[in-house]
Image: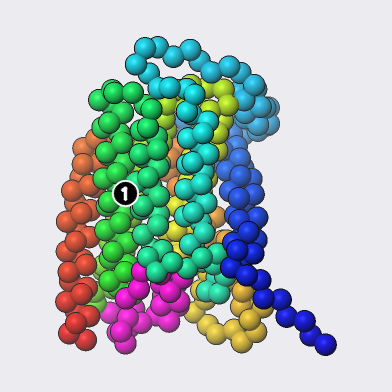
């Protein structure tokens, strides 16, 4: 007799979170160690791994967590909110990962507008950081800059939506696996040019958002808030890499058919994990190599990205209507 298990929706969510949360925590710590011990000294021209053969960065995390927060001056951030805010930020990372399909058949949740979840989460993350940050002009500018970058990312997601005719991230992966848009081959117009453009805009917006996270109040406060903020920032790198792979690189889909469902899922997970790891390392390497983004480049991405993405959406919809 064969017994089939049919878990409820909430059981599926609980099982998914039991995988996502530990993966983000462990992956965040490992990525932070690799960045601190290898990428940063390599970018600075120093010998690597740095710090007792790479062990010191892990020891420093434990030491930092046991320290007292630095005393703050008048008008600076309210330290009492810092730890709670990192928990809220981590929840946004988990929510983003929940809509990313590990394979064409494995995804925690499939909202119809899941393609835009990353942009929304990044915008909310900026607002969470802004809460209790005082009335300084710099904090306000950083907040609205990050909101603008989230809007640019949303426009890039809109291009993907127009290209593949769906805003479900899982459905986008399936459509990319099929390799055609409304019967038009993936290498035809406008996809051949528009898809790489949208990807470049999304990567630039995500990279600049990660750059803006390097100056959070929690990082300046030190102690446990700093450790938590560093972990959340690294978790954001993992979530952004996974979203980019699903939205622009086909996720875990493979261009050939696999009849056995179990083999197909295992293959898809391996392909997705490999792509995500490569994109994660590329983002971490870029952050270590270019630790600061010039304001002129930021303005160019905000303005140029919005114009190019809006034009791409219009062109795509026009061509799709004529096919």
Query: Considering the image in quadrants, where does the N terminus appear?
Result: bottom right
Residue 318 vertical placement versus 295 (above, below): below
Question: Dividing the picture into quarters, in which one does residue 296 lie?
Answer: top left
- Relative image position of residue 30 (x, y in whole percent): 62, 42
Q: Is residue 102 visible?
A: no
Q: Residue at x 36, y 52 (%)?
A: 120
Q: Nearer the viewer, residue 92 or 296?
A: 92
- The region drawn magenta spans 165-188
Q: Nearer the viewer, residue 71 or 256?
A: 71
**Label 1 crowd (10 A; few <14 / some 14-19 / many >=20):** many
What secondary structure is marked by label 1?
helix
Asked whether residue 11 is drawn in magenta, I would say no
- Relative image position of residue 259 (x, y in whole percent): 61, 87
Q: Residue at x 55, y 33 (%)?
A: 228
Q: Residue at x 47, y 68 (%)?
A: 110
Q: Nearer the viewer, residue 178 or 148?
A: 148
Question: Dividing the picture into quarters, in which one does residue 268 lie?
Answer: bottom right
Give left or right: position of 197 versus 4.
Answer: left
Give left or right: position of 12 versus 119.
Answer: right
């Amino acid at each position: 007799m064969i017994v089939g298990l049919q878990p409820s929706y909430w059981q599926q969510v609980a099982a998914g979170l039991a995988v996502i949360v530990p993966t983000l925590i462990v992956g965040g710590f490992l990525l932070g160690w690799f960045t601190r011990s290898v990428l940063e000294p390599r970018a600075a021209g120093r010998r690597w791994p740095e710090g007792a053969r790479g062990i010191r960065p892990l020891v420093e995390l434990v030491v930092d967590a046991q320290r007292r927060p630095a005393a703050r001056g008048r008008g600076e951030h309210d330290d009492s909110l810092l730890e709670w805010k990192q928990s809220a930020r981590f929840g946004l990372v988990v929510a983003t990962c929940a809509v990313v399909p590990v394979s064409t058949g494995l995804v925690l949740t499939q909202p119809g507008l899941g393609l835009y979840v990353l942009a929304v989460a990044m915008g909310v993350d900026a607002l969470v950081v802004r809460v209790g940050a005082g009335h300084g002009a710099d904090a306000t500018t950083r907040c609205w800059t990050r909101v603008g970058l989230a809007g640019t990312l949303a426009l890039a997601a809109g291009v993907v939506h127009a290209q593949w005719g769906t805003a479900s991230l899982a459905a986008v992966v399936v459509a990319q696996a099929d390799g055609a848009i409304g019967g038009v081959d993936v290498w035809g117009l406008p996809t051949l040019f528009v898809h790489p453009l949208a990807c470049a805009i999304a990567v630039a917006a995500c990279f600049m958002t990660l750059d803006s996270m390097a100056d959070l109040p929690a990082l300046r406060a030190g102690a446990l808030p700093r450790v938590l903020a560093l972990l959340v920032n690294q978790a954001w790198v993992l979530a952004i890499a996974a979203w980019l792979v699903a939205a622009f690189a086909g996720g875990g889909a493979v261009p050939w058919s696999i009849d056995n469902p179990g083999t197909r899922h295992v293959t898809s997970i391996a392909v997705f994990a490999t792509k995500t790891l490569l994109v994660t390392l590329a983002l971490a390497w870029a952050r270590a190599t270019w630790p600061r983004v010039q304001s002129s480049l930021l303005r160019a991405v905000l303005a140029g990205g919005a114009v190019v993405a809006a034009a791409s959406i219009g062109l795509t919809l026009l061509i799709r209507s004529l096919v």
